[in-house]
Image (spheres, rainbow, N blue to C red):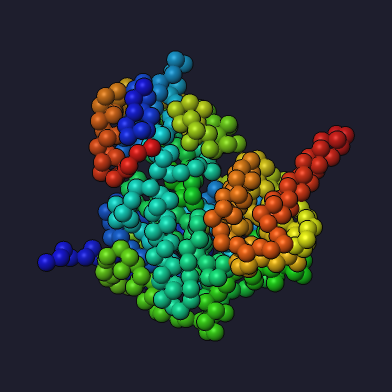
């Protein structure tokens, strides 16, 4: 006779404000750690448009603060790592609160991979070909449909993600400081090639119950557990939630990391070859020596088309000094069909952007004080 | 110099094995706090570091800094109580120093200890630390650094 399957709780929180979302994360993580809560999978939507920066990110570096203020977009800071994102009522958040041992590994990258692969199966259950793309995306045909990130404290972890049901790409471009800003009218089309929503892919938006059924089905099978639905938090969890909300619904929490925009310049590189004209916008964290984001556009042709989005994902948050290795490793294992274009062309575009950055640094240094 | 499953565990430090953190009393009376090479191996490359501010009081086993690797955010829990007297500017600029030199240049904070004798008595040292890390790695199913 087989042993009883572990039981995890599942909760649908419904619409929450950004601050309530962050407070829920903190409260349930703490409740799980204190043994006041079981392993839990939860879902929510956002009752207000919001821009959420990662725990270590600076609001000024990631967001257009003026645009957010002018359009009533709340700014909040997540407890998890990763990049900034824009959310509204068309985004579903899913969250997993687990004892680390239930995740089946002590290696954090392995844990993230297993959770993301399971979540991708859940999204596939809705009828789209969702796949995990390292390090933290879930994509369909190369277009991102969910971003993820996590946090841990002792033996307890929270790993969560967004899921785009329907999505306002134009607004995302205005809220987030991303390298596409210099593309102007082409930016929206360019962003649509990189981001997908379930409504667009399926021809209609799935309901919250459909998403919950699809995701819980995947996690039940993937982790060998059964789910017990709950309607609300326990009184002890609600107390922790009230304390957490008072702490995060404050300027002190949201603004706790502050770094200047000047540390994150965007450099443009152009490269013309037999394969066409290639442009790369490279957003760099100069203080920490990392590529924040790369954005390739132009009239060149690659097969599969998703190669560009996949290369950008590989370059995201990678060491600036190791960019050649990152590109070489990517192409070494990528099944690309490129007749007139090769890895050297992508490298030349990046090289040109970085030369522009070096020239800029010299020019700045040459300006008399 | 000790090692467990390929992870360097220097024998001159005091460890909280559960929290994967170390402490060292310096000649000027301050205490340096850091994370173990085992913690670095589990986390992967650390890309962000936010220490508590200088002057802040830290309770024993509470967070003295937050680090991020592979989109995971986690606390570094100080093995001893104290007031933060220095944070590591080199690590602020290059968080990956924690991975490269966790017991040297990659230190996390320096504290003016509140009760070094009392707090450090409960920490593991020398051979006892190696045994405790081996047990933890066994429970964690860790293959090696």
At a point 40% along the width and 79% down the height, the residue shown is A209
**Residue at coordinates 70% horizontally, 70% vertically from top-left?**
A188
**Residue at the extreme top of the image, as rendered:** B27
State the count of labels. Answer: 0
Q: Is residue A119 left or right of residue A220?
A: right
Could you say where residue A113 lies in the image, as x and y percent from the top left?
A: 42, 57
Identify the image quadrant of residue A362: top right
* Residue found at x 43% / y 61%: A116
Task: Give percent across and percent down for residue A181.
Answer: 73, 61
Q: Is residue A162 above or below residue A290?
A: below
Q: Is residue A58 visible?
A: no
User: Quarter of the image containing the N terminus of chain A?
Assistant: bottom left
* Residue A187 falls in image quadrant: bottom right
Residue A94 in view of the camera: yes
- Residue A336 placement (x, y as % from top left): 60, 62
Q: Position of residue A314 (x, y in %)?
A: 57, 54
Report the side of A304 relative to A67 (left or right): left
Q: Residue furthest front?
A: A339
Q: Nearer the viewer, residue A51 or A307?
A: A307
Is A138 or A141 nearer to us in this picture?
Answer: A141
Seen at 67% across and 42% down, the residue is A286
Image quarter hosting the C terminus of chain A: top right
Pick out the residue farthest to the left. Answer: A1
Residue positioned most to the right: A368
Residue closest to the eye, A322 or A334: A334
């Amino acid at each position: 006779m087989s042993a009883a399957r572990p039981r995890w709780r599942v909760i649908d929180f419904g619409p929450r404000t950004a601050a309530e979302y962050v407070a829920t994360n903190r409260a349930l993580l703490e409740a799980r750690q204190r043994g006041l809560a079981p392993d839990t999978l939860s879902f929510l939507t956002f009752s207000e448009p919001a821009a959420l920066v990662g725990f270590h990110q600076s609001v000024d570096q990631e967001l257009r603060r003026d645009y957010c203020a002018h359009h009533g977009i709340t700014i909040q800071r997540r407890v998890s790592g990763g990049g900034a994102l824009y959310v509204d009522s068309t985004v579903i958040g899913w969250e997993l609160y687990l004892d680390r041992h239930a995740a089946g590994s002590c290696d954090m990258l392995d844990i993230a991979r297993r959770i993301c692969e399971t979540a991708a199966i859940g999204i596939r259950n809705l009828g789209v070909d969702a796949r995990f793309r390292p390090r933290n995306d879930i994509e369909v045909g190369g277009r991102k449909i969910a971003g993820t990130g996590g946090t841990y404290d002792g033996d307890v972890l929270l790993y969560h993600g967004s899921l785009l049901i329907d999505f306002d790409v134009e607004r995302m471009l205005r809220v987030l400081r991303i390298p596409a800003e210099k593309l102007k009218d082409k930016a929206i089309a360019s962003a649509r090639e990189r981001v997908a929503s379930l409504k667009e892919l399926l021809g209609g938006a799935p309901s919250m119950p459909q998403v919950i059924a699809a995701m819980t089905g995947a996690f039940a099978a993937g982790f060998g557990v059964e789910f017990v639905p709950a309607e609300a938090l326990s009184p002890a969890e609600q107390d922790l939630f009230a304390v957490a909300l008072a702490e995060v619904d404050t300027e002190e929490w949201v603004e706790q990391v502050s770094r200047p925009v000047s540390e994150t310049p965007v450099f443009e590189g152009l490269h013309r070859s037999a394969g066409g004209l290639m442009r790369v916008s490279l957003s760099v964290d100069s203080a920490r020596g990392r590529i924040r984001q790369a954005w390739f556009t132009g009239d060149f042709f690659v097969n599969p088309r998703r190669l560009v989005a996949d290369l950008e994902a590989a370059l995201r948050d990678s060491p600036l000094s190791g960019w050649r290795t990152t590109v070489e490793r990517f192409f070494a294992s990528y099944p690309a069909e490129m007749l007139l274009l090769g890895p050297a062309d992508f490298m030349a575009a990046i090289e040109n952007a970085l030369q522009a950055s070096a020239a800029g640094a010299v020019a700045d240094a040459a300006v008399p004080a | 110099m000790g090692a467990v499953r390929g992870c360097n565990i220097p024998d001159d430090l005091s460890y909280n094995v559960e929290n994967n953190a170390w402490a060292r009393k310096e000649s000027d009376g301050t205490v340096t706090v850091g994370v173990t090479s085992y913690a670095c191996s589990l986390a992967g490359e650390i890309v962000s570091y936010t220490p508590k501010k200088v002057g802040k009081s830290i309770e024993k086993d509470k967070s003295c800094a937050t680090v991020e690797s592979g989109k995971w955010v986690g606390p570094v829990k100080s093995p001893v109580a104290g007031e933060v007297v220095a944070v590591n500017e080199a690590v602020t600029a290059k968080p990956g120093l924690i991975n490269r030199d966790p017991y040297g240049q990659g230190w996390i904070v320096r504290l003016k200890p509140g009760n070094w004798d009392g707090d450090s008595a409960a920490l593991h040292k020398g051979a006892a630390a190696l045994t405790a890390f081996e047990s933890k790695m066994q429970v964690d199913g860790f293959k090696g650094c």
